[in-house]
Image (spheres, coloured by chain):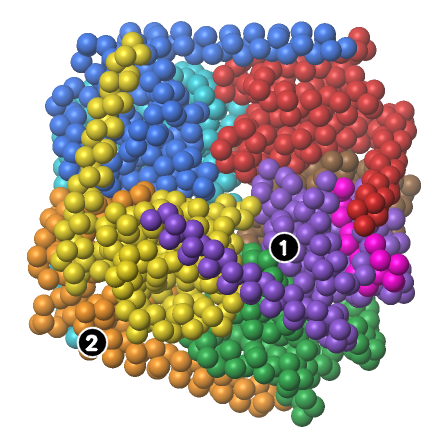
Chain colours: A purple, B brown, C green, D yellow, E orange, F cyan, G blue, H red
Amino acid sequence: MPTRRPRVGIVMGSDSDLEVLRETIRVLDDLDIPHEVVVASAHRTPEQTRRYATRAERRGIRVLIAGAGGAAALPGFLASLTSLPIIGVPINSSPLSGLDALLSMAQMPKGVPVATVAVGKWGAANAGILAAQILALSDANVGKRLAAFRRALAAEVQQRSRRVAAQLKKRQ
Amino acid sequence: MPTRRPRVGIVMGSDSDLEVLRETIRVLDDLDIPHEVVVASAHRTPEQTRRYATRAERRGIRVLIAGAGGAAALPGFLASLTSLPIIGVPINSSPLSGLDALLSMAQMPKGVPVATVAVGKWGAANAGILAAQILALSDANVGKRLAAFRRALAAEVQQRSRRVAAQLKKRQ
Amino acid sequence: MPTRRPRVGIVMGSDSDLEVLRETIRVLDDLDIPHEVVVASAHRTPEQTRRYATRAERRGIRVLIAGAGGAAALPGFLASLTSLPIIGVPINSSPLSGLDALLSMAQMPKGVPVATVAVGKWGAANAGILAAQILALSDANVGKRLAAFRRALAAEVQQRSRRVAAQLKKRQ
Amino acid sequence: MPTRRPRVGIVMGSDSDLEVLRETIRVLDDLDIPHEVVVASAHRTPEQTRRYATRAERRGIRVLIAGAGGAAALPGFLASLTSLPIIGVPINSSPLSGLDALLSMAQMPKGVPVATVAVGKWGAANAGILAAQILALSDANVGKRLAAFRRALAAEVQQRSRRVAAQLKKRQ
Amino acid sequence: MPTRRPRVGIVMGSDSDLEVLRETIRVLDDLDIPHEVVVASAHRTPEQTRRYATRAERRGIRVLIAGAGGAAALPGFLASLTSLPIIGVPINSSPLSGLDALLSMAQMPKGVPVATVAVGKWGAANAGILAAQILALSDANVGKRLAAFRRALAAEVQQRSRRVAAQLKKRQ
Amino acid sequence: MPTRRPRVGIVMGSDSDLEVLRETIRVLDDLDIPHEVVVASAHRTPEQTRRYATRAERRGIRVLIAGAGGAAALPGFLASLTSLPIIGVPINSSPLSGLDALLSMAQMPKGVPVATVAVGKWGAANAGILAAQILALSDANVGKRLAAFRRALAAEVQQRSRRVAAQLKKRQ
Amino acid sequence: MPTRRPRVGIVMGSDSDLEVLRETIRVLDDLDIPHEVVVASAHRTPEQTRRYATRAERRGIRVLIAGAGGAAALPGFLASLTSLPIIGVPINSSPLSGLDALLSMAQMPKGVPVATVAVGKWGAANAGILAAQILALSDANVGKRLAAFRRALAAEVQQRSRRVAAQLKKRQ
Amino acid sequence: MPTRRPRVGIVMGSDSDLEVLRETIRVLDDLDIPHEVVVASAHRTPEQTRRYATRAERRGIRVLIAGAGGAAALPGFLASLTSLPIIGVPINSSPLSGLDALLSMAQMPKGVPVATVAVGKWGAANAGILAAQILALSDANVGKRLAAFRRALAAEVQQRSRRVAAQLKKRQ
């Protein structure tokens, strides 16, 4: 992790969620946004998680990203303890394919929002981008890198279109 | 509430859940089990809820019953803070009919169980009975009242069978 | 709407969504955050919606909130056109109770996040709060009003707890 | 692709959808219907996709087929930009098995229909057949080839019935 | 119904589906497309339905629209008997809110497509529009009326936007 | 109930299920099949239910129809105790709209089938018809009445078709 | 297949369903019930399927078992053409895991029941047993073999209980 | 199994459920709680299961844990026969991923609660912990071991957090 002070905290309930959340780390690395990664469970280490959440703002964290599966209480737990924006990544680690985690994050009661993204790797990448969009509101450099990132994504789609066309032509 | 020391704590995230949880209160009243009712939200008043949960055992509470709708984190939150058995009642207060609350309670991760019952009033009544079953393991009087309660339920089914038969005969 | 320049744009695909999104307006009014309301459909008026989205940032909008039901493409459509953070409110206006809108918003592909909140009124209120949390990162006054708003919510839960207790005592 | 002017445009949001949409290509090849394949994303390359959609009719395209997974906005996006009939193929590329894509396509609001077919390969093949049925209304040759295609399908079912019978007899 | 030869056949499994399918009739009336309405059940009057389907093409019908609820076999049944394009409208007449009808229509096997639209009234209106889009491929007049219809829909969205803005201003 | 020996036993877990199961009674009355109605709960009166199930065959019962909601164990419980065919009617009495009852009946393990029909009134009527189809295999009179019943259903569909046509004409 | 006249017809929409329906064949073989297997599709070979269904009763068939996946119309199609009892086996051959097939079979409209069993192999085996239960009503020999079959199943459960106990003991 | 009198009975409907329920056994072994394991099916060996349930309390069993898949009637069946607390573990052994088992257990009718935990291995482990929480109410030694078990779980989370941090550092 960069030595600069982290701006985004990535919290996961279990280290088995790391495989999915690597997508978040990759995006934040690509956008050169300093971040930190913490394993902290709403249910198994509530006290440490509480301490982490209540101190995050003072430590310079601006956005928290929390990934969890099943009764995925972690992002809502953080949201109850800090006014920082919380992004929730539902993880498909239970037999119910992540529908449980999606509902457990999205259906938060009035007063305590969680910004929920897609189940699994798509969502993990998008959590990083959403954090960047939020940071870009007060940091023009992040905004520039984000714009470049989006142009690269679009260029990739166009390149793939050409590759598909070439591939289909060859087949004839 | 009875002046005897409460043995069961009923916790709800919102007073709008009271309509459903009245079924729990009714069952505990019928079984003469002293209880208390608290409105405390995992998400909106985490600190008070935490205090309630961590002191419950010392105050003589033996079982906690928590009702909540949507991303129903309340019973899991209590479960992370005390070793008392926690019973969760999913409440159908969101447009998703309680499926969200059911999954948010049942799908708890390893280490922190919530004893989940049915969505809505059936579950609320059953939460009271399950609490009584647990208390009956160390209190023979509760066991006797519970046995009587179950005999009454069975008698009611039989009486209804006769009433249905009579009603259908008349119709002829 | 206040004469100050709006910071939050609330976009709805149909005026029938206004009933739900009034919760968003109420929260933003309470937090004294200037906002504007637009009816614009991803599917029926794509050109106007596109114009609105691509100009929003220049006009000083910092966060867009989009409510829609069914195949709720509106927030994703906005997200494809601007780098502003987009909050999606799934609305339960189809016979499928909003599950369709929830999946259509949350399951966005890599590159284009939508910050999805709960189906219906809970989500509409939370969209306003989430927007405030984001704005508070660069506006300390919003942060103070938000903190007060959350304390008020917590106080309300405690007051309701007392009311429930009183109500149950009377019943005895 | 044939040098004749394409009549059907197959659009996919990501080249990873090609595996499923090959079924569409195969059917259109079998029915000798000229077609083209484009990778264009509603969310990542909205401007290119818009250009493609708004020019398709003038270029002689009669039917558009769009495959997408997750919050599968692509067919609805095309439908908002052209009056050509749009066929949507939900693709099971997210952990939610394509239910998300199915609802995101089928539940379109009044005014902008998407002709949705089955999730995955069945749907991809049927999209080609449905396009042929539409073209056959004004092209008797397509109609003849389609009738032959359907007779072949029926013959295949009968042949398989005999094969199953033979296989089961041998087993005795 | 107009005395001109009908081009679209609307088939419903039960007259209780008429309430929903009136939306289809209204759209076709608005677009001045001659149509006919038939109550015919795949399950209760298979022989009559078969006769209707197999003769439809010869009688000048170009598109069939079938509405049904529950195990909504009607559109698939028609699709097995004619090569005309079939549009299916899932109707929410069972306790499962139309999810059963949606899956029973969309998930057709390879070879026999049903163009499935949204559950209920949205889908019923869209079925009429989709039929018009298909007819417009070989009838420029339908195309013109359809373009006008879409402009009217867009104008309505804009008018509603102004009405919402006015309404919200008054409230202040 | 007729004085002839009942051939079909209708069992319900709660008298609140009678509203739905009246459809079954009506069909059996129409087909003149002697039947009896019993309120017996798998969960609340297991002993009485067991006695009823194990004696049914000897008493001349040929088919059992069981309606239940929620964790609808009743038909499976009967199926474990007798070799008579058991028909299960899922009842939508819980907030989950009968999906719970449908899965609890249909998903029986190997060895103990339950013939599951539709949720609610459609299923209740069909349970009566299915029972008649089974009885008709060894009772030609039931077969004749059943054939007449089906002809009447078909005639009703045709009559409704005419009524719809007339109604739509008048409207013009 | 035995040379005796078949009493049960097993119909499948595709030979790929044979893998699941082998369970049905195995059970009928074990119970020595003569049967036949036919590949016939409601959607792809409706005419042949119709002929099969309408002649089945005259040919001595007493029960029809139909397996299908997706929009599994086959059993309902048969049910619309004959008064024989129809048993439906939902097959999990689409990406939606058989939920589509289950709803497409169970949710039949009033008048045309399908006796639906579990998704996949459990259901396939149970279809055979249910057919035997129906045949046993008029064939005491089938009844005897069925009783033996069920005793064998129970004995197997007990033997497995002992094996599990032994296995767990060894582990110590 | 220990020679001390078992306090917890683990019942499974099929020995194929053992793989999941080993998690329960492991937890009870870790907490040194004497237990026994029985294969007994609600549907295939109802009489033996009934005998087991009705004698369990007299034999010193305090809590029953039942795992089952599909129409998972086993825990409800036990609950109808004894007043001991019953914990249900839904097992994902059918193609519907355990949603069927979850609903079949959680949605119990008023009067007969089942304490339902998560689908699969998480739930199996939690069933053991919940049983320990119940036993701890009257056995301080179990309470002490349970507290140690929870501290170990929390320590493991913290250790994993350090391991993840180390792993991510190395990657740089």
- The residue lying toward the viewer, choosing from G158 and E149, is E149
Task: Name the chain letter of the residue that bears numbered label 1.
Answer: A
Crowding at mark 2 (Cα within 10 Å: few <14, some 14-19, many 20+): few
Q: Write down the residue under mark 1.
A: A123
What residue is rendered at 63% in x and 20% in y?
H18
Q: CA distance from mark 2 to mark 1?
A: 45 Å
Classify residue F144 by image quadrant. top left
Q: Is residue H12 left or right of residue F29?
A: right
Dot 1: few (<14), some (14–19), or many (≥20) neighbours within 10 Å?
many
Q: Are marks 2 and 1 on the same chain?
A: no
Please report the residue visible at 28 percent of the width from the left and 33 percent of the height from the top: G13
Q: Position of residue E95 (x, y in %)?
A: 41, 49
The amino acid on which the numbered mark 1 sits, given as a three-letter code, is Gly
In reply to whether residue F140 is colored magenta, the answer given is no
Give the image quarter of residue F33. Answer: top left
Q: Is residue A13 magenta?
A: yes
Q: Which of the labelled discs sits on residue E140, or is there none? A: 2
Residue G59 position (above or below residue F166): above
| Magenta segment boundaries in residue numbering | A1-15
Classified by dominant secondary structure, the portion drawn in magenta counts as loop
**Circle 1: element type:** helix
Residue F149 visible from this viewpoint = no
Q: Is residue E158 above or below residue D18?
A: below
Q: Quadrant of the N terminus of chain C?
A: bottom right
Q: Judge by depth and name the residue closer to the eye, A154 or A169.
A: A169
Element under disc 2: helix
* Residue G102, horizontal then vertical, whole percent: 40, 38
Residue appearing at x 83%, y 20% in the figure: H32
Query: Is the residue F66 above or below the residue B96 in the image?
Result: above
Does the image show residue B57?
Answer: yes
Q: Amino acid at mark 2?
A: Ala
| Residue sticking out furthest to the front | A170
